[in-house]
């Protein structure tokens, strides 16, 4: 694999590999082997239907090729010793299974020296004639190029997911909007009369929509500081949708607000796939509340 390696924490890499294996083999075909209780036994995941076991390892980057290779070789030596111990956890778990491949999953594999070392250690394991090891047993080193590219890219998007911390609106922030342009508030109230006939409930609904609007503005502010490019994409998309609504004087039917919110949320996530869905939902809710105040949406 060419290029600079990604920086991975060991636990994060293990979780990443688990999801990749579940996508490849099916979630019900991958058994996690936790190391927290009673220690590590030289394997992290078992894919028994294909007689594979995986061990995950992420070198603390950045390092050069030689150092990375030495660390990976050392990992193979240490964990294969645990895996081969007849009195250890691997033997107890695998029992009469016949494991064909012990796979070290690493973010970056770029040295044939590690392959040579793995072949040597595999020969040593075969010579032990372990009851849970197949006669064709091999040790393999795999990195990101081994996994399906679409699955890898999807998991990387989730890894880089934008999760802005959005504060809840304060009563003061809601009051500022409520005491502002009364034309907008009256417009909102008039539209919601078509959905809520009880005057007391209507005022509660209006306040809730103002709260949603302020929460959405807070979310966009948080997004602007956290990911300016994503913020620009979201604002541009909302502006374009607003323009189309105004030009078409759009009249909604059925369950209009839910449909519009869902549509806008889907568009936002299509434009910024790694945006947290909760943040997208908050922004979409607030945008539709804003549109109700500014007249592009009609509920009649």
Image: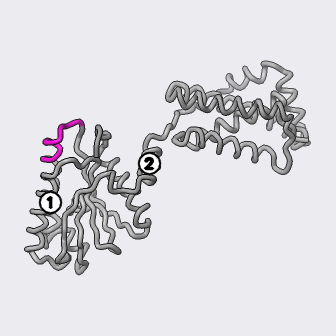
Residue found 55% across the figure and 32% down from its top? 230
Residue 102 location in percent, x, y? 22, 65
Q: Is residue 221 above or below residue 95?
A: above
CA gap, disc 1 to disc 2? 28 Å
Residue found 64% across the figure and 29% down from its top? 235
Q: Is residue 242 left or right of residue 253?
A: left
**How did the renderer colour the structure?**
one colour
Q: Which residue is mark 1?
A: 118
Q: Which residue is mark 2?
A: 153
Tell me the element at label 1: helix
Prevailing secondary structure of the magenta residues: helix
Residue sitting nearer the eye, 78 or 171: 78
Residue 37 location in percent, x, y? 27, 60
Residue found 53% across the figure and 26% down from its top? 228
Residue sitting nearer the eye, 78 or 112: 112
Is-magenta flag for residue 277? no
Quadrant of the image occupied by residue 210: top right
Quadrant containing the C terminus in the rendered view: top right
Circles 1 and 2 in contact, beta carbons < 8 Å: no
Residue sitting nearer the eye, 1 or 183: 1
Tell me the element at label 2: helix
Residue sitting nearer the eye, 13 or 120: 120
Disc number placed over residue 237 in the picture, else none: none
Q: Point out the tag, 1 or 2, that comes first from the N-terminus.
A: 1
Q: Is residue 178 left or right of residue 167?
A: right
- Crowding at dot 2, Cα within 10 Å, few <14 / some 14-19 / many 20+, comes out as few
Residue 69 location in percent, x, y? 15, 47
Q: Is residue 277 above or below residue 40?
A: above
Chain part drawn in magenta = 62-70
Residue found 16% across the figure and 56% down from its top? 115
- Crowding at dot 1, Cα within 10 Å, few <14 / some 14-19 / many 20+, comes out as many
């Amino acid at each position: 694999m060419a290029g600079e390696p990604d920086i991975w924490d060991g636990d994060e890499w293990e979780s990443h590999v688990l999801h990749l294996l579940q996508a490849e083999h099916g979630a019900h075909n991958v058994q996690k082997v936790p190391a927290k209780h009673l220690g590590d036994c030289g394997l992290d995941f078992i894919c028994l239907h294909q007689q594979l076991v995986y061990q995950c390892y992420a070198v603390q980057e950045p390092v050069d090729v030689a150092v990375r290779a030495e660390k990976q070789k050392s990992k193979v030596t240490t964990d294969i010793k645990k895996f081969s111990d007849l009195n250890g956890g691997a033997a107890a778990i695998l029992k009469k299974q016949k494991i064909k491949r012990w796979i070290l999953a690493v973010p970056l594999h770029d040295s044939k020296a590690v392959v040579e070392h793995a072949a040597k250690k595999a020969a040593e394991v075969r010579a032990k004639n372990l009851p849970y090891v197949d006669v064709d047993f091999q040790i393999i080193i795999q990195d990101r190029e081994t996994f399906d590219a679409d699955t890898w890219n999807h998991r990387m998007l989730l890894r880089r997911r934008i999760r802005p911390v959005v504060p809840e609106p304060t009563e003061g922030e809601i009051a500022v909007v409520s005491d502002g342009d009364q034309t907008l508030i009256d417009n909102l109230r008039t539209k919601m009369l078509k959905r809520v006939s009880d005057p007391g409930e209507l005022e509660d609904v209006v306040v809730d929509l103002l709260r949603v609007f302020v929460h959405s503005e807070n979310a966009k502010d948080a997004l602007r500081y956290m990911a300016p490019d994503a913020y620009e994409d979201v604002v541009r998309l909302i502006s374009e949708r607003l323009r189309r609504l105004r030009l078409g004087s759009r009249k909604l039917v059925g369950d209009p607000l839910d449909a519009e919110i869902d549509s806008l949320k889907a568009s936002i996530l299509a434009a910024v796939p790694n945006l947290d869905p909760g943040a997208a939902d908050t922004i979409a809710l607030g945008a539709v509340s804003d549109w109700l105040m500014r007249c592009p949406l009609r509920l009649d």
